[in-house]
Amino acid sequence: MRNLSFPTLRAVGCATAESADSFVASFRGARAPRTLTRWIGCIQFLTLLVLTAGVSLAQSIPPDIAKKLDDLDKATKNAQMAGDNAWMLTSSALVLMMTGPGLALFYGGLVRKKNVLGTMMHSFILMATVSILWAVIGYSLAFAEGSPFIGDFRYVFLHGVGADPNADYGATIPHQTYMIYQLMFAIITPALISGAFAERMKFSAMLLFMTLWSLVVYFPMAHMVWGKGGLLNAALGGKYPAFDFAGGTVVHITSGVSALVCALYLGKRDNYPDESMRPHSVVLSVIGACLLWVGWFGFNAGSAVAAGSLASSAFIATHFATAAAVLGWMVIEWLMAGKPSVLGAISGAVAGLVAITPASGFVKPMPSILIGLAAGVVCYLMVAKVKKVFGYDDALDAFGVHGIGGTLGALLTGVFATKEVNDLRMGKPMGWVDGDAGQMMNQLIAVLIAWGLAIVGTLIILKICDVVCGVRVSKEQETEGLDLSMHGEEGYNLES
Amino acid sequence: MKRIEAIIQPHKLEDAKEALKNIGVDGMTITEVRGHGRQKGHTEVYRGMEYKVDLLPKVKLELVVGDARADEVIRTLVTAARTGKIGDGKIFVYEVADAVRIRNDDRGDAAL
């Protein structure tokens, strides 16, 4: 009925009238047809009116069909939300796993036996403290719209963070999902720093340090890069839009550079480098590194905030970069040190994961391999050669891997970002390969801000902690080992 | 009574135990130790840091036997534990003042 439009009906009617006309004319002669035509015309007109009215009524849809369409619309939206939310909740769990037990094992295996529990505790306790800080004020400072540098207090105590999506941060997932996902990043970032002050930092000082560091360094940096209106936010109106898909600047540069500052401020471990401080269990570190690799898929691919093709692209870039980095580190170590170590292979993996973090959702697979390869080689040289030249005791190479790897990755993102992977600028070029070499400037600005904030913030916080409770343990406590002196425990009581 | 203390290569422990069993000696104490004589250790490298490891794993066997049997036991141990290379180990022999069996207070040779 709907396909019958007024013009069609009218055309049909006219044609009928004319044929009726000629039919009657053939019987009645030329004089009579006018009256009959008029009659037929009237009848046709009235019929037309009735039909059109009926068609119009049909075009205001019967209510049961309208409801069906509405339900269908809702169901489609729910299906999309379900897929995206399932992936984002999974990603959140994967990223938390990166801290515990991933990083806990990775770092724990690298220290001496007497410090294994203390080192694991550095990662584990942050899962508790940062979480509460985030719920109370952290999420708001990082992600509420405020100034270009820090958020305001609208989400304090998670007020306003509910089941409905936040259009700026993931239009297809509950706002709560986004909040909890970002929390896992806030947890692992300070945990990375612990690699620098391992085996000699006081536990109470560490708790205070991490709380202040989150407030002074992490929340502002996260806000600048990912928060609405943030200075460096490429997606939400930043003045210097930098591409940082999953946190090369926010997570790795800030933590890595802060790590260097901590290593320099706290000073070298007792008897370093004369006394043998071999890892007590590279076995634990291998397990930790593998958990980091798998978990990192949540870190990078989850940063797509949806379960679509960008997540796949980020997943793939992550994986291939890591593979290349392992090989890069292994080959250069083999050539320069004579044997390919297992510790080197897993360190290469972490270096690759770090470097691809900012680039993961912007680059194609082949550039990912290049980025990984570069990270493997550069980070090896940093850790095995450059560190010795300067003589600082970055115990677990947090700066060498995260600080340098993050800086390298952030800059290479400016080179290889392409609209063929991520059309954030809606047709306009993304990185150097697209023709926009100027993007390198924005990347550099973000890198410099991260370095600057980390250095200044960490120095001030360390001074405060030192005054309040002293940051370094005593010589006796260090010799005894943190497990006993800080926690009253031993990691392994194998004779019992 | 003589205490015979033999520090040998760990992979030679099974041969030594078997040889002693074959001459009828069952009582012994085994300890895992570290040390070196003239044997050089090895170097381990962790992320560019070199570590000289010169305390090498060895196994220490301790037995107490009657004076009459001491020479036989020493010859058996030497034959079983020898590889001919540096690092084979050493045997030391000590005088024992007394021995007591805890289960039933036996003393001297009867306690062995």
Image (cartoon, rainbow, N blue to C red):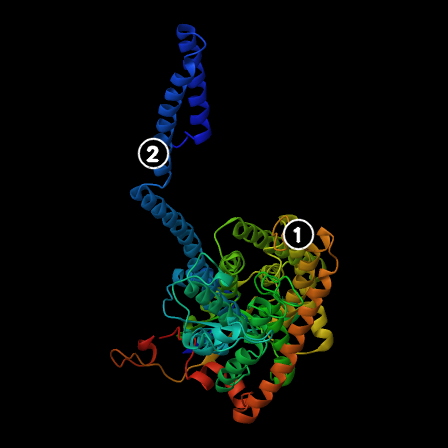
Contact flag, marks 1 and 2 (Cβ < 8 Å): no
Q: Chain of mark 2?
A: A
Mark on residue A50?
none
Task: Characterize the local packing of mark 2: few (<14), some (14-19) or many (20 or more) Cα atoms within 10 angstroms.
Answer: few
Find numbered disc 1 in the image and state the secondary structure of the residue it sits on.
loop
Judging depth in this view, the residue of A165 and A392 nearest the camera is A165
From the image, tell me which residue sits under label 1: A418
The answer to whether one can see residue B53 in this image is: no
Give the mark, 1 or 2, whose residue is nearer the N terminus.
2
Foreground residue, A428 or A375? A428
Have a look at marks 1 and 2 and say if they share a chain.
Answer: yes
Residue type, label 1: Thr
Residue drawn at (63%, 56%) of the image: A325
Q: Nearer the viewer, residue A22 or A157?
A: A22
Q: Is residue A134 left or right of residue A335?
A: left
Q: Is residue A241 above or below residue A9?
A: below
Q: Which residue is mark 2?
A: A54
Tell me if B86 is positioned left or right of B12 in this view: right
Extreme-left residue of the structure: B104
Using the numbered discs, state the Cα–Cα distance from disc 1 to disc 2 in whole angstroms.
55 Å
> Can residue A334 be seen in this snapshot?
yes
Circle 1 chain: A
Q: Is residue A180 left or right of residue A348?
A: left
Q: Residue furthest bottom?
A: A467
Considering depth in this image, is A222 or A61 the residue closer to the camera? A61
- Residue type, numbered disc 2: Gly
Q: Residue at x 51, y 72 (%)?
A: A144
Residue A370, percent across and down?
68, 53
| Mark 1 or mark 2, whichever is nearer to me | 2
Residue A271 position, x and y percent, is 62, 83
Mark 1 surroundings: few (<14), some (14-19) or many (≥20) residues within 10 A: many
